[in-house]
Image (cartoon, grey):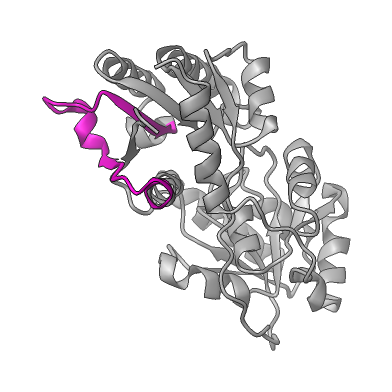
């Protein structure tokens, strides 16, 4: 396979997009036997790679959508780029930020030789925004199943939401669905700039009689164990792009409750038996049923967890060598 791109890994090791980029680079190197991972700083060095693939969300690359788009355009003037778009713009960005982010993503897509998104749902978002890349690939986020472990009995069962806290992530919907006296766990800390939102959220939950435990950032080596320690996993975003949190729950052997919608129906079709689709208006009922039937929150033996990381690497390799006019 000649002419593969350098696989760019950004510096923020805690960011989910950095983790996705690093994991893809590791799996692709294993599949090809070639060193491909490269730090993002190489793109702006005096000797940039001839070809590169980067994972893009505007907040990871610059402090504003405009600056992020301009940076990628400058890079594309020196290096032939393909890009995986994460956090695709949508209604939850709000009336001020959505147009700015949409313009940013349109500029990045125009600068790239090809674009990958992680779901048909995200591809539809691009089409709805009038963004038409030169080449478009759809490669779902992978699941990397952890070795099986014994299931835990809970003296004080909790309902857990995984990932950075920010408005719209589903935490508020979960609290509204819980009865007084319930416990909720935020498996993560606040996203940058949302510290005050998290403080206000915990106070509002307490006023409803719901205790909220915030773990703060969970190191990668502890993440699977923490996912397995929760009584009921829930993924209740108002507006999905793609969900690394959902893939992590499945990797831990869990079958989370997920809010029914276009993206989650796509994931239920892709990985049968790995999620329980829930009408958002019936989330409280579904949580109560899950607490009464703990086995329902774990994957059954016939659940389909693929595509795994090696499948993802293979899909990218086919795309780079077959669809891209370098």
User: Considering the image in quadrants, where does the C terminus appear?
Assistant: top left
User: Which quadrant would residue 93 be assigned to in this image?
Assistant: top right
Residue 137 placed where, x, y %?
58, 27
Residue 173 placed where, x, y %?
72, 52
Q: Tell me if 56 is positioned left or right of 281 in this view.
A: left
Q: Tell me if 103 is positioned left or right of 298 in this view.
A: left
User: Considering the image in quadrants, where does the N terminus appear?
Assistant: top left
Does 63 appear above or below 302?
above
* Residue at 35% over, 30% down: 2
Does 28 appear above or below 297?
above
Task: Provide the residue span drawn in magenta.
Answer: 28-57
Residue situated furthest left in the rendering:
46
Is 36 colored magenta in this rendering?
Answer: yes
Residue 50 placed where, x, y %?
26, 23
Does 188 appear above or below 12?
below
Is 231 colored magenta in this rendering?
Answer: no
Tell which of 71 and 95 is nearer to you. 71
Can you see residue 94?
A: yes
């Amino acid at each position: 396979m000649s002419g593969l791109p350098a696989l760019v890994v950004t510096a923020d090791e805690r960011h989910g997009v950095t983790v996705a980029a690093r994991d893809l680079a590791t799996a692709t190197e294993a599949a090809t036997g070639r060193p491909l991972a490269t730090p993002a700083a190489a793109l702006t060095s005096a000797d940039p790679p001839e070809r590169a693939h980067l994972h893009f969300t505007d907040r990871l690359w610059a402090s504003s959508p405009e600056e992020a788009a301009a940076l990628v355009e400058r890079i594309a003037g020196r290096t032939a780029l393909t890009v995986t778009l994460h956090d695709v713009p949508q209604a939850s960005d709000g009336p001020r930020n959505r147009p700015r982010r949409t313009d940013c993503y349109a500029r990045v897509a125009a600068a790239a030789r090809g674009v990958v998104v992680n779901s048909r749902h995200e591809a539809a978002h691009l089409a709805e925004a009038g963004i038409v890349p030169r080449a478009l690939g759809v490669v779902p986020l992978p699941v990397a199943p952890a070795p099986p472990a014994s299931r835990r009995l809970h003296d004080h069962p909790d309902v857990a939401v995984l990932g950075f806290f920010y408005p719209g992530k589903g935490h508020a919907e979960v609290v509204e669905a819980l009865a007084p006296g319930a416990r909720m766990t935020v498996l993560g800390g606040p996203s940058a700039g949302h510290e005050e939102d998290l403080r206000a959220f915990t106070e509002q939950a307490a006023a409803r009689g719901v205790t909220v435990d915030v773990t703060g950032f969970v190191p990668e080596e502890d993440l699977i164990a923490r996912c397995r320690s929760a009584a009921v996993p829930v993924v209740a975003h108002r507006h999905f792009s793609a969900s690394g949190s959902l893939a992590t729950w499945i990797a831990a052997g869990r079958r989370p409750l997920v809010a029914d919608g276009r993206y989650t129906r796509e994931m239920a079709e892709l990985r049968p038996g790995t999620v329980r689709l829930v009408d958002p208006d019936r989330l409280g009922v579904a949580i109560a049923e899950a607490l009464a039937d703990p086995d329902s929150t774990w994957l059954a033996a016939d659940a389909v967890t693929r595509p795994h990381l090696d499948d993802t690497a293979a899909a990218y390799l086919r795309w780079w060598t077959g669809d891209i006019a370098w």
